[in-house]
Structure formats: C-alpha cells, structure tokens
Image (cartoon, coloured by chain):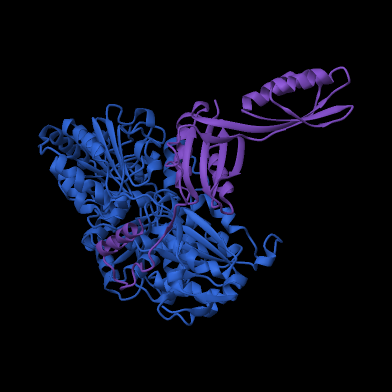
Amino acid sequence: MNMTYLLDVANHTGVVTRISLIFRRHGANLQSLSTAKTEHPSIVRIVVTSDLEGRAAQRIKGQLSKLIDIFKVDMISNEEGTFRAFGMMKIACTLQTRPQILQLLEIFNGRVLELTIEWVLVEMTGTPEQLEGLLQVLQPYGILEAVETGPIVIRRNSPRNAARPQPTWEVVPGTLSAGTSSTSTSTTNSTQERKRYGTDLL
Amino acid sequence: MSKMRLTGAQIVWKCLEREGVDTVFGYPGGCVLPMYDALQHTPSIHHVLVRHEQGAAHMADGYARATGRVGVALATSGPGATNLVTGIATAMLDSSPIVCLTGQVGSKFIGTDAFQEIDITGITMPITKHNYMVTDVNDIARTLREAFIIARTGRPGPVLVDITKDAQMASCDFEWDFAMPRLRKLETWESPDPDQLAEAAALINNAERPVILAGHGILMSGAMQDLQLFAEASDIPVGLTLLGLGAMPHFHPLCLGMMGMHGEAWLNHAIQSADLLIALGMRFDDRVTGKLESYAQNAKKIHVDIDASEIHKNVRADVAIVGDLKQVLPKLTPLLTPVKRSALWAEINEAKGAVAVRDIRNLPDTGHLYAAHVIHDLWRETKGKALIVTDVGQHQMWEAQYYHHSEPRSLITSGGLGTMGFALPAAIGAKFSRPEADVWVIVGDGGFQMTMAELATIVQENIKVNIAIINNGYLGMVRQWQEFFYQRNYAATPLVNPDFTKIAEAYGILTFAVTHRDEVAPTVQKAREHPGPVLIDFRVEQEDSVYPMVPAGSALHEMIRRPSAIVETADE
C-alpha cells in the first residue's frame, strides 16, 4: 500500500530537495510528488506518495518533521482526505468509435479538449483510482499518449480553519546574544545560557 | 544600535560579534577574501588559522562540545567547503552546535562550473540541521541570526551558510534589530504532559529491575544534578552511553559505567535482565543495543528525548516523553516511591566483583606496557580532572573504560560518526573554549596521522595541549576485528609509522617516548608541568584487544571476555 504524506512547507528554494533526500535515504520510491499553492502565499502544500510502509514510513515522517522549512507533516489514508488528480489522454478514434468514446467520457465525467478525425484529447479530474478506471476502459481504442499528475489533498476532518497552520513565522526577540560575557564560561553557565536562549526564543 | 552602511563581509563579523563568538577557525581563499579583509576591524574575534579545513570543522565542534557554545568554522568555496564535510557530518551525528561559513563564487557565475565553484549547500543537505545559500547582502544578517538559533535550539546541530562573493562585497544598511530571524514556530519543551509523567512514574514504581540509560542529552541539557536526584529517589542503577560519560560521577554508588559493545559486563547483563529501561537523552544506537531482536526482551521502555523523531526509531517505547530533561526530570522525580533495591544491587555487585579479577590492571606486571595502564595512570595523575579528547578506535574504548569521568563535558569524542582524525583538532577547539582546562588528546597512531598537520596550529597559537599517542603500530580496532572474525588476516592494518617524537620536535613541541609502565606517571607529570604543548609516544603492546566485546549483530549479553592467558598470548 502507498503512504501519502501531506506536507505544509515554507515557500523556499530547495525544500523539495530536502524532502526527497529523506525519502531517498530510506530507499523509498516516490510514486508521486505534487506541489500546490495554498491560500497563504508563504505556505506550499506538497503531497508525496511512496511505497514504504510501517516503521520506515514512520521514521520518514519523524525526519520530515525536523526539517526547518516544514510546518506540518501528516500521513493520511484515502479515507482521511479528499484526493484529486488530473489526467490528460490522447485516444485514437475513428468515425465508428468516436460516439463510444464520448459516451464513456460522459460516464467518467471527463471532457473533450480537442477532437480530430484521428484522435480525441480528453481531460479528467478525479481520484487516482477514477483516472485509472477511465484509462482502462479507453485502452481498447488505443492510447496515443497519457499523463497524470500526482494527487493533491484536502484533509477531510480539519476542525474548521483551526487546524490550518496560519503563517507561523516567529519573529524572534532581538536582544539575545549568548556567550558574550567571557571566554571562561563554566559548564553550568553555558548550559543555562543555551537553555535561556531556547526558552526566550519559544 | 543605529543604522550603519556596511559591506556584506563586515556584516558577517558584526553578526558573529553579536552572537558572542570569540573564536573562528578558518582557512582563507579566493571567495572569502572580502571576509578576511574585513576581519581586521573586528578585534574581539580571534581567528585561528588551521592547516586543513577538516581541522577547522572539528575545532569548531570541539569548541562547542567543551562548553555548549556555538563553534564557528570558515572556509572558502570549492575544495575549502568540501574539506569541511567530514567535520560537519561528525557534528551532525553527535548533535554538536556549529555554524560553518563558506564563501561561494559570485552569483553571476553560479551554475557555470566556475573556478572553485561547488554546490556545497546541495552536498551538505543531508549532514546539516539546516543550510543556506545567501546571494543578497540584505539577507546576510537575518540568515546568520537564524543559523545560530537553529544550531543551538532543541537538539543542537550544524548549520552551514554559503555566501556568494558579490554578496560579501555589496553594501547595505545594517541594523541588528531589524534583521529579525524568521523561523517557523519551534516546539516548546517546557511542560511535559502530566499523564505521560504519571504513566512513567507508575512503570518505575512497579518495576523490580529497572535500569537508567543516560546519554549525551543529560550533558547538553545540563541535567546532571537532576539525573542523580532522579536515580537516588528510587535507587535505580545508571548506565551511561559513550557520549553520556560524565553525566553521572563515575564513583557515584548508583553509576555502573559505560554500556554497549565495549561496555561493562555487569551493566550489559543488568540491561538484558531488566524489566524496565529508562532511556534519558540517548538514541538506542546499534553500538548500545547489540542485536535489536534480543535487546532487553522483558523490559518495558520509557524514552525521554528532545527529538521526537528518536522515539520508536530503533526501540519501541511504552511511554514516550518528548522534552528537555532539565524540565522533565524534576517533574518526574517527586512521583517516585522511595525504595531500596537490595536484591538487585547484590546481584550487580557480585557480577562486578567477578569481572574485576580479570581486569588488566590486576594482572601481574610482566614489563609489558598496556594501553589500559597508560590511561589508568593518566587518570590518576590528572586526578580525573582533565578534559580528555579521544579519537576513534581501541584507545577510545580503553579511555572510556579506564578514565573515570566524574565531571560533565570532560570527555569529547566522535561517537556517532566515528571519525578518525577528530581528536587533535577537536582538542584545539576545546582549549579555546575552556582555556583553563587541562586538555589531553588521547589518539591512536593511525588517527593521529590523519590530522597531524594541526600540530602547526598548536604551535602557531601557542596553546597548551598535551598529546598522548597510544602507539601499537596497528589500526588496532580493525586488527582486533580481523583477529576475532577474519582469522587473523591482518590485511592493511599494520602501520609503518614515522618517529612521532621527531615529528613533534620538528614543530618545536616537547616530546617523550614511553615503553615501560613505571615511566608513565612521571612522564605525565613532566608533561603537565611543562608550560607548552607536549607529545608523548606511548609504545604499547601491539596485539592487545578491547574486552569485553559484543560482536556486531550479537545480543548484548553475548560478550567475548578477556582470555585469562592474555599475557602469554601477547608474548607470541
């Protein structure tokens, strides 16, 4: 079974690399990775599905959570979120098969983008399973080209907007300066210094 | 501070000053020339010229570990930056707060394979807590402030900041107070969940055979006192990890010494037969657990760590508390029921007694010099007060076994990454961090040769660092594995060594060579009295091994013990 990770990340250069490095380190194969803008300009929603399960998947989640650029990491199942992917397919068609294809398309809620005498280009939005379904029924007519995005996801049970991380940029007080006093800081002092730093910040 | 118009290079030094940095370990080069030029206007920061950038990273690391203050290393682009990599990884694995500054080619040249251009942020992504590339002078101050916060907050770690040469040369208005760090909200570790504390206390109060496993986290959190009070409250034996040595005074009646692959036999047995393990600021490394499937099978586990991703990583915890030990322990201790665990202690003490007989210190003196003798005598002569920096290998384990650490931060060693060549530069850094400390490097003849160029740094800076080479003419730990597991096929482990005393002499360092046990103590004394750096070449038994040993992949109680005929075997 694939695991789906829902990541709210800062809109920073390199954040996708940092994320994919953690999957790569565990030898996980990324099934899909999609990035999407959110309602907040500094937050990007990244959805990753990978083939690793169990302890390793949990370990990945923990290590993702440590990334400085990541606000929130969720692992969710199909039931816990609404998944939508987008697909485009170019199907070979003849005068005879055209009505059949259009009919199938209607059943699957697909849409025609372009139509020629030789092929029809269709688009569809749906769960990855629905897209797979459409692809299967169109298979017999001859698929010339087909592409599909990874899914983007909205959590089903977000308790109103409360769970949505608001821009969580923390402005840190400007007066902190650890260790300015002297070079011969004793161990205890320096630890306290570090601690004080930690708490002031938080 | 009022607004000033400064160059990027000047801003770097201003920020370091404001962060309380007094020492920077670095090596100049084309892309950091603006920074070196601006250094002259910053008299409060001392720059230490190293001989190899790896040394700079280790020095920053040693500096950080000696006190907990952030260490800073500086290197140029390209090879300067890549030479830092081993040092950064070492700091990452042992959670050491360092900030590495590297120069980068001008932003116009990025991606063109320009001279000495390398994607150092790409290279160091997996081995830093976070890293940055700065191409705009306006971002330098904020980025550096963030870097220091990230390095020392929560679980500390290395941060790299790569600054392009044009950003160093450009100017902008600098005002510290406006260069506010913008970080995501970091967790607070202030108040551990009362329910979890109660659950943990219930487990402890119901346990018959609990053992505390205390690690590096105790030292980093400064929770030494809290650990003692916690253990004493319920008479619980305390085992320490390698990096945790010093978290509890060695001669504290509840302290059982070091655990793991070369740990004390009585402690490993106590862990294996425990019904409760209380892991405090440690991460169940494979060198500590042995084979996981057979690790403390009957024990429930309480795991307290500041890093949530450590919980359940290697060992599933029954109760997990994510928090700062300094906050957690004082809240947990009052919940414990005072008990005396006499039966458990009787058992442990019996095991201790049996092992002591086989201790190498107690074997008849046959004129052989063993590393254990050297370290034991060094411990006696320094009254256990020295700041010891060890390298990696046999001597590292002997040091951990025979130098009885009773002070926090009195041992600096590369535990996680196991970086040979770490000791000498790390000791230099430690000396700058704690100038009053009696710093001793204990290093093997193999590891010493990896970074011995830094002898020049010692002489140049005229610092008092004592170096004890445990010279057995082998890459000893590897040789030991070959002896035990590869039928004594000593492939590529015998070393042809230079005369280390002559090398040190060439640098103007006072040297001694020691071959007999009775010379150890007087030589250590002479070294301590000498005002400058000293190197002692201890020429020890060549084929001595570290006992006990849990072979990799074995259960923790399946130890190889010291053969009683060790003295005879050594004669062969």
What is the count of numbered marks?
Answer: 0
| Residue in the foreground of this view, choosing between B335 and B452 | B335
| Residue in the foreground of this view, choosing between B353 and B275 | B275
With B327 as the anchor, is B73 left or right in this view? right
Relative to B97, say whether A181 is above or below: below
Relative to B197, say whether B22 is above or below: below
| Residue in the foreground of this view, choosing between B200 and B386 | B200
| Residue in the foreground of this view, choosing between A166 and B558 | A166
Quadrant location, the C terminus of chain A = bottom left
Quadrant location, the N terminus of chain A = top right
Specify whether residue B425 is in view. Answer: no
Q: Residue at x 16, y 40 (%)?
A: B335
Specify whether residue B2 is in view. Answer: yes
Location of residue A45 in the rendering, given as x and y in whole percent from the top left corner: 55, 43
With B383 as the anchor, is B392 left or right in this view? right
Q: Quadrant of residue A184?
A: bottom left
Q: Residue at x 57, y 43 (%)?
A: A20
Relative to B355, say whether B156 is above or below: below
Location of residue B505 in the rendering, given as x and y in whole percent from the top left corner: 43, 73
Chain B in the picture: what colour? blue
Q: Residue at x 53, y 74 (%)?
A: B9
Location of residue B303 in the rendering, given as x and y in whole percent from the top left corner: 30, 39
Location of residue A87 in the rendering, given as x and y in whole percent from the top left corner: 70, 32
Q: Quadrant of residue B221?
A: bottom left
Chain A in the picture: what colour? purple
